[in-house]
Image (cartoon, coloured by chain):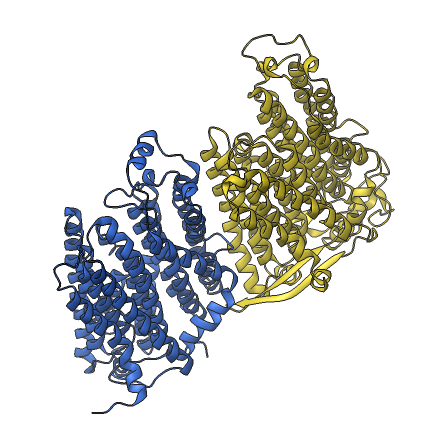
Chain colours: A blue, B yellow
């Protein structure tokens, strides 16, 4: 069987990470992998090469435009956008992982292999409307992540967090499956883009079973974006997992889940008008709950990782507000927000690695005074945290601006007010990070302990944080380029929105 | 140079940032060099701003303008629009003047991380100048918010014992107002199709009056927090007392002005009817701020806190002048903003100088300072008298015009409120002179632990060089205020005419600034021409 170039184009972004993952897995069979330097270097090099090849290939595809559908794979601009998004997150994760796993003393090649499989699953998940392929993608990216959360087996909390994530995730996946089955049963087709017009033609648009099916599908997505009330796994899983993996989960999982949600609900199920309206109402209610609960709980955390976990929950709330507005411009805002969010959160978790916080020592007190000791990291931290809080001129402000603007334009002024109040609350806990870095000096005890330990050496994590801070600043000054040239084109060519 | 010729305002606004980042990149060990670089840069900028902005005639029109489309996001165009005109000319010059002066005045106040402080100071200058010059509301909003960041770190890192609390309070307080304002801004931008204030004004006038009122309130709250107007002033004493001297000077000198300027530039022109509708509550809050600020200042034991509360009182005058909707009152408010920048800035500098020597600011720790520091006492006395509003100093002219404007305004409450506010002038004399008496006069405090005991040296040449220009300005503004308000007369008169302000009532005095435009020979029968909003209100 020979494939045409456009068919290869659909497959290769999925294949590169898988091939890389297999190679890394083979390399990690060497039982000296934790001690022999060149094996470690080769494993990380292979992983970076696989990710880099995917990135290069996707950017190349981006210039040629959307590819025809092949084998249920829509390698359109939206899928390419997702691919670039995920691959950049993965590259930052690998860079931070090199430093972090050395600090933890737990270097294993399997981590990288799992990460690469997960990347492939994520691209698949966001590139299809066929239910089976969708479910396959969901499981392909989820199962490696369950393992990755519990990867540092030396820490007992790690296994606990992994187990928690796995059990709740399995329930969500089965709900998602059940939703798909219901829709399949009533429409007779597995392709959700085809199912919607069929159901509408049969007059089943408001059938309770269709509603239940759509609601269960929605539940699956909302679990992955950690929206309230499906958020309980988030703080435990993030706290348990290594910092770079927590960053990857917070960014990539949330990102692809939102993009797939965009492709399925407003993109494919649009012909079922009533379902869309009802789901929008559900999303609105949950967005409010997510914003309120995420922000208020984040206020009282003493552990930075748990704070970042609750902050990522609240960011899911802002992104859901974009779905509440539901206009093409709002989706444009959501995609732009995701790009900035990638840099902000990978940067925030990268900072923990760059400052050399390991294991359980991730409280605000452990950060005291570090901003002055590591000025470049300190400035990056200020940029990233202020951007997370949505203060101009950082990129995070423009993401919120675009979403709130659409909320106001569609008459949801109350929701917009709630959103800005939520970001006011969030400013307090992001400032706490900066207070610890710059405004507090380390205690005498911590000072003494620090002088006993060797100096933190995390050049790759540091470099990745600088890259993230640069992207965040670029989001503040090249906002029109990112929003119109990148995010908007993904929507226009991907979903045919915004024509 | 051709770029510079066509973009002088861009240079003025962003040159401090460039220099600031350069300084940040220098190593910590070069702190002294960084401080010098920062000062020279700020001084050069002051000279340039004088050279570029002055001498364009006093017509009040636009002096310099830069305008080009910047970007369009989600369908709303944003303009890169900077301009200097009669309304902001002197505030811009005040900013570029105070920054190098403050740097020089607090040269040795800070001991560590002086380079970073200078860099943040320059970033703050960009924020202030940008906010003063921006004519597009989105652009203004960016600077308005970005300004918080350097100020937050200046208070939080170099402040007093409660600095973290004060910095967070300052940041979150201001943010709360401006975030709600953002929603109103977005609402109005959707109606107007952009952030141009003129388009926004047209769009606003087409909205139902109730909606206009809500939008005006959200604008007003954001600006009133910055001013700060009475119930929203609680962040100010904390921020002022905890901030290092340089931070207090700039906070009082420029940041507070942005609130009043925001009313004059944006809130009143965009919502004239709603502004008129709320003139009475605004004036009432201003009067409360004047009297309450003065009463609270009277009982303070910390000199710096006393000056902070006197700011609340003085800025109350500014708001009263704006709420009077008369040319003389508004011009008085413009002048009072400059006055307050000069006088209160000078007071904070002087308090900082004595604190650097004695390491205390408690009034009770002093006594008989006049014996030990005669030159310092002389400067402090002049500034105190200016703050009280002695004739021939700047404070008198501003307060007199404001009270005159409130008294003459077409609103029914004008006379009563003007009379009540006059008590603020009296109370001002009480708290300032009483403090002065306890600190400077009397027998020398010989106690070993006292502040006076630690005052070993009078002002040095650097400190005198800082205070002299301020004293010259105090007298100049008191003797010939027209220099500073001539350019704003036409824009202010125009603003009030377009806002359809009620004509002033009677002529008790014929004020000097009040010559041409808004003098209606109609006199007392101004009642007949009252607009509807005014009627509603009564």
Q: Position of residue A335 (x, y in %)?
A: 40, 67
| Count of numbered circles in the view | 0
Q: Residue furthest bottom?
A: A1
Residue A25, image x, y percentages: 16, 67
Position of B477 relative to A70 (above/below)? above
x%, y% of residue A443? 35, 31
Which quadrant of the figure contains the N terminus of chain A? Answer: bottom left
Taking the spot 63% from the left edge, 37% from the top edge, the residue there is: B103
Asked whether residue A227 is in view, the answer is: no
Please report the residue visible at 62 percent of the width from the left and 23 percent of the height from the top: B354
x and y percentages locating residue B535 in the rendered image = 69, 47
Question: Relative to A274, is B335 above or below?
Answer: above
Relative to residue B409, is residue B353 drawn left or right? Answer: left
Choose top left, top right, bottom left or bottom right for residue A434: top left
Nearer-the-camera pick, A285 or A468: A468
- Using the image, determine if residue A213 lies above or below residue B58: below
């Amino acid at each position: 069987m020979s494939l045409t170039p456009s068919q290869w184009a659909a497959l290769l972004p999925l294949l590169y990470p898988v091939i890389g993952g297999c190679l890394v897995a083979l390399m990690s069979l060497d039982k000296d992998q934790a001690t022999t330097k060149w094996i470690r270097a080769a494993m990380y090099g292979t992983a970076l090469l696989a990710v880099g090849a995917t990135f290069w290939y996707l950017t190349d595809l981006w210039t040629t435009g959307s590819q025809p559908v092949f084998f249920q794979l829509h390698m359109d601009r939206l899928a390419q956008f997702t691919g670039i998004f995920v691959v950049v997150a993965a590259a930052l994760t690998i860079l931070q992982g090199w430093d972090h796993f050395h600090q933890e003393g737990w270097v294993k090649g399997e981590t990288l292999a799992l990460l690469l499989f997960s990347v492939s699953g994520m691209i698949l998940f966001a590139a299809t409307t066929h239910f089976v392929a969708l479910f396959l993608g969901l499981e392909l990216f989820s199962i490696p992540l369950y393992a990755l959360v519990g990867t540092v087996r030396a820490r007992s909390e790690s296994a606990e967090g992994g187990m928690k994530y796995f059990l709740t995730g399995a329930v969500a996946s089965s709900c998602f499956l059940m939703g798909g089955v219901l829709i399949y049963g009533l429409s007779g087709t597995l392709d959700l883009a085809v199912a919607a017009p069929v159901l509408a033609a049969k007059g089943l648009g408001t059938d309770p079973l269709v509603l239940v099916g759509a609601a269960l599908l929605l539940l699956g997505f909302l679990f992955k974006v950690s929206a309230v009330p499906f958020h309980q796994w988030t703080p435990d899983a993030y706290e348990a997992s290594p910092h770079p993996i927590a960053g990857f989960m917070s960014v990539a999982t949330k990102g692809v889940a939102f993009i797939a949600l965009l492709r399925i609900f407003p993109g494919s199920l649009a012909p079922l008008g009533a379902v869309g309206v009802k789901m929008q109402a559900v999303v609105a209610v949950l967005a409010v709950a997510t914003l309120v609960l995420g922000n208020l709980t984040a206020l009282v955390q003493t552990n930075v990782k748990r704070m970042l976990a609750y902050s990522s929950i609240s960011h899911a709330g802002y992104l859901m507000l974009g779905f509440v507005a539901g206009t093409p411009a709002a989706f444009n805002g959501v995609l732009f927000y995701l790009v900035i969010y990638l840099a902000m959160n990978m940067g925030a978790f990268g900072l923990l690695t760059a400052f050399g916080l390991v294991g359980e020592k991730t409280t605000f007190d452990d950060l005291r005074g570090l901003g002055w000791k590591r000025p470049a990291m300190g400035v990056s931290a200020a940029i990233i945290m202020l951007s997370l809080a949505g203060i101009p001129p950082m990129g995070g402000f423009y993401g919120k601006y675009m979403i709130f603007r659409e909320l106001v334009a569609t008459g949801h002024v109350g929701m917009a007010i709630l959103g800005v109040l939520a970001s006011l609350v969030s400013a307090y806990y992001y400032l706490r990070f900066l207070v610890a870095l710059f405004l507090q000096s380390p205690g005498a005890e911590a000072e003494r302990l620090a002088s006993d330990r060797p100096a933190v050496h995390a050049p790759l994590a540091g470099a990745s944080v600088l890259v993230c801070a640069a992207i965040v600043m670029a989001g503040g000054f090249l906002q029109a380029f990112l929003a119109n040239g990148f995010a908007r084109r993904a929507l226009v060519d991907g979903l045919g929105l915004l024509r | 140079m051709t770029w510079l010729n066509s973009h002088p305002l861009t240079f003025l606004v962003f040159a401090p940032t460039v220099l600031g980042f350069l300084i940040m990149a220098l190593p910590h060990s070069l702190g002294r060099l960084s401080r010098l670089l920062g000062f020279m840069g700020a001084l050069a900028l002051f000279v340039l701003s004088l050279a570029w902005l002055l001498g364009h005639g006093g017509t009040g029109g636009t002096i310099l303008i830069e305008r080009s489309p910047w970007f369009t996001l989600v369908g709303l165009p944003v303009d890169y629009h900077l301009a200097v005109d009669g309304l902001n000319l002197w505030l811009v010059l005040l900013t570029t003047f105070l920054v190098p002066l403050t740097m020089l005045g607090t040269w040795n106040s800070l001991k560590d991380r002086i380079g970073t402080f200078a860099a943040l100071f320059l970033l703050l200058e960009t924020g202030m100048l940008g906010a003063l010059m921006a004519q597009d509301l989105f652009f203004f909003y960016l600077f308005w918010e970005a300004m918080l960041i350097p100020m937050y770190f200046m208070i939080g890192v170099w402040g007093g014992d409660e600095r973290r609390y004060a910095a967070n309070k300052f940041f979150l307080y201001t943010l709360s107002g401006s975030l709600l304002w953002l929603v109103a801004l977005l609402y109005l931008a959707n109606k107007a199709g952009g952030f141009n204030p003129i388009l926004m004004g047209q769009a606003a006038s087409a909205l139902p009056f109730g909606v206009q009122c809500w939008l005006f309130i959200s604008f007003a709250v954001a600006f009133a927090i910055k001013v700060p107007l009475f119930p929203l002033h609680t962040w100010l004493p904390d921020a002022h007392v905890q901030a290092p001297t340089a931070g207090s000077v700039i906070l009082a000198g420029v940041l507070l002005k942005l609130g009043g300027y925001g009313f004059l530039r944006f809130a009143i022109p965009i919502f004239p009817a709603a502004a008129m509708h709320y003139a009475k509550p605004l004036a009432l809050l201003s009067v409360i701020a004047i009297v309450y600020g003065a009463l609270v200042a009277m009982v303070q034991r910390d000199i710096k806190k006393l000056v902070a509360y006197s700011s609340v009182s003085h800025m109350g005058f500014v708001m009263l002048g704006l709420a009077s909707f008369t040319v003389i009152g508004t011009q008085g408010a413009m002048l009072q903003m400059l006055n307050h920048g000069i006088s209160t800035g000078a007071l904070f500098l002087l308090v900082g100088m004595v604190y650097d020597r004695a390491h205390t600011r408690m009034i009770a720790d002093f006594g008989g300072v006049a014996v030990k520091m005669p030159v310092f006492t002389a400067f402090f006395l002049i500034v105190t008298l200016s703050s009280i509003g002695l004739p021939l100093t700047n404070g008198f002219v501003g307060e007199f015009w404001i009270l005159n404007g409130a008294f003459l305004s077409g609103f029914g409450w004008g006379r009563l409120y003007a009379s009540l506010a006059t008590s603020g002038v009296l109370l001002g004399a009480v708290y300032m002179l009483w403090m002065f008496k306890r600190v400077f006069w009397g027998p020398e405090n010989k106690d070993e632990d006292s502040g006076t005991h630690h005052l070993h040296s009078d002002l040095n040449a650097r400190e005198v060089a800082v205070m002299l220009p301020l004293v010259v300005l105090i007298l100049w503004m008191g003797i010939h205020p027209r220099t500073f308000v001539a350019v704003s007369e036409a824009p202010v008169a125009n603003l009030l005419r377009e806002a359809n302000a009620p004509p002033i009532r009677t002529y008790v005095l014929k004020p000097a600034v009040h010559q041409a435009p808004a003098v209606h020979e109609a006199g007392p029968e101004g009642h007949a021409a009252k607009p509807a909003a005014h009627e509603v209100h009564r």
